[in-house]
Image (spheres, grey):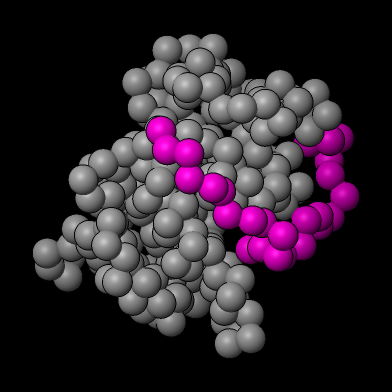
């Protein structure tokens, strides 16, 4: 680990609204009963070994930023019980939906954070993650809001710090301008390399990809999803 200073979060805000419709009773109950047990305690230093965060043995750690409806996170947690997952989602309704499913499925390899993902990134120790997912993030299409896009030089520095050498950052979007924005930012970052060698590499979903409701909506509306994969260099 290094002792370099962590970046200030005073003016950062990468998400929009926090709450939608009134929660259904099972969702409200899950939010009250299940979330406290799974929420990361950022008030304490992160453990040197993140594997201790889960009650089951894990050999890999994967972070998903903004899991939305939770379809992808649940699918990956079910298919890889030896991976510890950290899911971040500030939107209360989406968090409640996921918690209901976690409780029903009895999953033990997920921990959660219900606020800004940069809080988790700044809390994590160096080189602790094997994988980061940023799937269909808010594109903030207006130019005056571009500073709120999660892909930025400062957040890529955060990714580089917490990813292990050889670790992977996966990004998916159906918004051409955000795809181009992401490629441009990663192209100039010295610690990442785009893994694509042919067009099919960014047009084809990753192995085991379950799809998401956002992706289904994009396809219905005639937009083409793009799947980008970047490797954290040694």
Q: Give x and y (percent) for residue 194.
A: 23, 62
Most distant residue in the left direction: 197
Residue 129 figure quarter: top left
Residue 199 figure quarter: bottom left
Q: Is residue 94 visible?
A: no
Q: Nearer the viewer, residue 79 or 54?
A: 54
> Which image quarter is the C terminus in?
top left
Q: Tell me the residue at 33%/76% (across/down).
A: 184
Q: Tell me the residue at 58%/38% (across/down).
A: 123
Q: Give x and y (percent) for residue 34.
A: 73, 24
Q: Which residues are magenta?
A: 1-28
Q: Is residue 132 magenta?
A: no
> Which image quarter is the N terminus in?
top left
Q: Is residue 8 magenta?
A: yes
Q: Tell me the residue at 40%/46% (across/down).
A: 161
Main SS, magenta residues: loop
Q: Is residue 42 left or right of residue 21?
A: left
Q: Give x and y (percent) for residue 56.
A: 48, 12
Q: Nearer the viewer, residue 88 or 214?
A: 88
As displayed, is residue 51 above or below residue 7?
A: above
As displayed, is residue 74 above or below residue 211?
A: above
As displayed, is residue 177 above or below residue 82?
A: below
Q: Tell me the residue at 78%/33% (across/down).
A: 31
């Amino acid at each position: 680990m290094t002792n370099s200073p962590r970046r200030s979060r005073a003016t950062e805000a990468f998400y929009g609204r926090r709450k939608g419709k009134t929660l259904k009773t099972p969702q409200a109950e899950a939010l009250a009963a299940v979330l406290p047990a799974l929420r990361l305690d950022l008030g304490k230093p992160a453990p040197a070994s993140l594997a201790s965060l889960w009650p089951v043995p894990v050999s890999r750690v994967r972070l998903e930023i903004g899991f939305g409806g939770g379809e992808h996170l649940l699918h990956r947690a079910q298919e890889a019980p030896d991976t510890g997952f950290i899911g971040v989602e500030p939107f209360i309704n989406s968090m409640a939906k996921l918690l209901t499913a976690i409780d029903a499925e009895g999953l033990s390899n997920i921990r959660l954070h219900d606020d800004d993902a940069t809080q988790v990134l700044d809390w994590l120790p160096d080189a602790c993650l094997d994988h980061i997912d940023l799937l269909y993030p808010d594109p903030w299409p207006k130019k005056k809001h571009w500073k709120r896009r999660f892909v930025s030089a400062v957040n890529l520095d955060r990714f580089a710090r917490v990813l292990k050498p050889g670790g992977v950052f996966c990004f998916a979007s159906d918004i051409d301008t955000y795809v181009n924005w992401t490629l441009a930012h990663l192209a100039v970052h010295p610690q990442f390399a785009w893994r694509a060698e042919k067009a099919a590499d960014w047009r084809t979903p990753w192995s085991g990809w379950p799809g998401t409701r956002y992706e289904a909506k994009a396809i219905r509306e005639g937009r083409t999803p793009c799947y980008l994969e970047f490797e954290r260099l040694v």
